[in-house]
Amino acid sequence: MAAWWKSFGSNGNGRAPSTAAEPEDRLVPAYSPHFDQMEGGRAPAFPAPAGDAVPDPSFEETDAAGVHAITKKTDYWFEREMHVVEREAERLAAEWAQKGLPRHDVPRTEPLEPEQVLAKLCEKTLGDWRQRVVTKMRDAIESANQQVGEHVAALRVKVSRLETFAHDLADREDRIERIKKELERPVQPVRYDRILPAGVFWAGAAMLALVEFVANFPVFRLMLPMNARLAQLAGRAAENVDDTRLTAGPNMMLIELSTHIEAAVVALVAVTILVILGKTIGNGIRAILALKPEEHPLASTAIRSSHRQHRLLIQVGTVGILFVLAFLFMARAGIGDAARARVAATDVELARGRAAAAIDNRDPGAVVQAGRRIRDLERRAAIQAEDAAYATTVEQNNVPIAMLNFALVLAAVVLGFCFAKDDLTARLGEHPDVVKLRQQCLDIRRDQILVTHEARAAAGEANLAISTIQHLLGARPLRSWDGKVKRIESVIPRFRGENARQRGLDPASIRAFDAPPAMAVPTIDVEQQFTEPAEFARLCEEKRELVLALDRLTPRRHADADSLEAAVA
Amino acid sequence: MPIRWRQPLRNRQLIRAVATAASVAIAGAGCAGEAQVKGSTPDARPDGRPPTQYIIGVDISASRTSQELADARMLLRTLAATLQPGDEVVFIETFRAGTDQAREWSDSLPALRRPPNMSGGERRQREDFQADVKAVAQVFVDSMRSKSIYTTDIVSTLWRAADHARAAGQRSTTIILLSDMLNATPELNMERAGSLPDRSWISSRQAAGRVPRLDGVCVVVVGAELRSARGPRVQAFWDAYFRAAGTELPVTRFHSMVTDPGELRCR
């Protein structure tokens, strides 16, 4: 007997009682026609016929709140346990029936052993069901209470942030008002004037250009020789200059300029670039030094824009000047070789001419021709020798000349600096701090709306959890106990009926079944109430106060509220 | 506060007045220069001498000594140094008997574009011209060639000179005969004793139109032989000949040697 009891275990099938939360322990009879449809021992998602597998409520909505969610699971559990008990009853009935027990003609005063077992199982099952319902209810209440606490805490944090936002917003709006009041005072003009008058500037610029041109033109004249025809033209023009007059020098200069066109153009371009870029750099430096955004906050945007543009011009101008000065330096470094090469070539030609003239020649015409050629070559050699000497001098003084060029550039920069002027008074804008503060206010309002939404959501969740608790507190989930009792009371009759059926007898004809089933159904207090969680009242009160504070801190309707709300949505 | 230059109204007026005065002064100097140029004589030359055509007859026959030839070269170099813009030089090697060819060379120097001012180019041209003349003189007065020349046809040379003189244009012509004036051709050989023709010879040739026209031409002889008794007779003959030709050859222009180019003019 003892061994037989042991084989049953606590529910009569050798296994521990299973729960709905442990799908792997759910019991489904292997003979159930639905067994093959299950995966991993889980019942199919349709209600099984009576006597077969119990539908698993886990396939239904798991987030169902309220008492129903709890009772559904406990009912499932009860049905499953009762199903096991009933199957055990049938098995015991069949086993006894095979042995022809109980004897049909022998009355029993004591309950049959299987009936005792079944009664105990039923009692335990019912007691466990009740305990499960109560526990689940309490757990649900506690869980809802925890949610209330969480949501109230979240609401508290949001309200605190809203208070901070309100404080920051008020502070920034105060600062905006203070700045606006300060700006109501008369505004100083944002400008700077020329230091030099136009006449001085233009005279200085012209003189600079002239000096640069005069200094650089001879270099290019040596570097860029004329073609033969132009050289002849230049020679004839120079010969026709009356060298007894004071204007002979300027005339010669003009002839040289007009015949050495390439050198004149290159020198002019170099000069123009240096003077113009120098002036531009001077302009830019003046613009950057004369006006500072910190000193004129209202024009800070215009001043920064002006600085950006002038900074670019300064950079480009500096690069251009450096290139031109480098070009001039390299040009001067190379003219000596060219000039000396020309002198050497002319010397060779002259030696050849003299050798030809030394040949005794009786022809007067040939003698005259040879003589003229030699004289021309000698004159050319003399000019080229002077040019070579000049080029050598320039080469040897390349660095000082470069420094002079740089000094002339600095003079152009100074001229540009002194001649610059600008007036940005008409381009005053808003105080940059006001712009910054206004943007910060906008950001704060945007955050306010977001946080307000979150706070409202938290308040809503808290309300939901409170309602859940209140609903659970008012629920009477044990009211369905009578159905359960009837179910458990049907186990022993099932045993008896199955036993009789197996034996082909009428249960009423079996004397051992005369006594009514002995089952002590425990008393259940269907009106049992659940206690309110300890912190529940406090949380409700805190939530109420926080909602009031939230209403107070909800931002006023603002001009940007619609766009902000739309952006947040 | 930026520095401001404030020019009172009177300062600006002063600057304008100074600028205007400077402009007027510069323009006036230019105009004065122009006036100086415009007021000068178009033909005025640095030395005051009018443009001259020098026709130089060079006699390098064997009768001329090497010293005489050297003196002639020296004279020509000195003469070349006096040449001025507008002058023309014609070298004619004296003709020889039996041939109607003689070496010639001629060249001229252009007149000044803006007399009397000479530009640098004009000065260079003058230097070149003078150097050319000196070089050509070296070629013409060649001692080496004189050893092989035995005849001298001065009459034909004068005909060629007359041809050049006709083309002198605005220039005055001076014929410089670097010769001993001893014509040595079969027709007229003055080197033989007693062969100097008389005036009838000149008259007959003049009547036949065989005397060249040298009207207005100044003739100077350098290198004549004056030490002997023949010298004056030779001078007289040529004086008569040149008179028939429309000019003259007085004793004052019949030289043995000349060192000053100033003596090569007809006063």
Image (spheres, coloured by chain):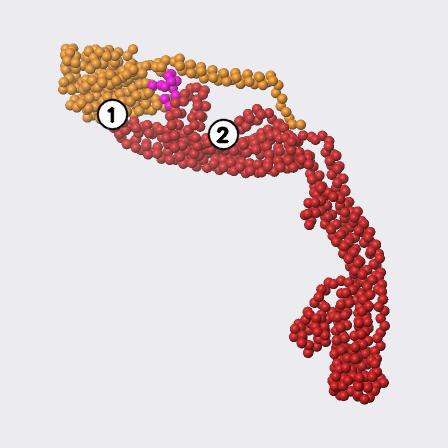
Q: Position of residue A558 (x, y in %)?
A: 73, 43
Region rendered in magenta: B111-122
Give the foreground label among 2 and 1: 2
Q: Which quadrant of the view contains residue A372?
A: top left
Label 1 crowd (10 A; few <14 / some 14-19 / many >=20): some
Give the residue number, with chain letter if any, for mark 1.
B142
- The residue positioned 60% from the left and 16% from the top of the image is B10
Mark 2 to mark 1 CA distance (whole Å): 56 Å
Which chain is tinted red? A
Position of A279 with respect to A168 (left or right) is left
The lab-note entry on whether marks 2 and 1 share a chain reads no
Q: Does the image show residue B223?
A: no
Question: Disc 1 residue type?
Answer: Asp
Q: Colour of chain B?
A: orange
Q: Quadrant of the N terminus of chain A?
A: bottom right
Residue A565 in the image: above or below residue A54: above
Q: Position of residue A385 (x, y in %)?
A: 41, 31
The kind of secondary structure element at disc 1 is loop
Residue A168 in the image: above or below residue B195: below
Residue in front for this viewpoint, A51 or A70: A51
The kind of secondary structure element at disc 2 is helix
Position of A333 with respect to A95 (left or right) is left
Question: Disc 2 residue type?
Answer: Phe
Give the residue number, with chain letter if any, for mark 2.
A213
- The residue positioned 26% from the left and 26% from the top of the image is A364
Residue in front for this viewpoint, B227 or B127: B127
Q: Position of residue B211 (x, y in %)?
A: 18, 14
- The residue positioned 79% from the left and 80% from the top of the image is A493
Main SS, magenta region, reads: loop
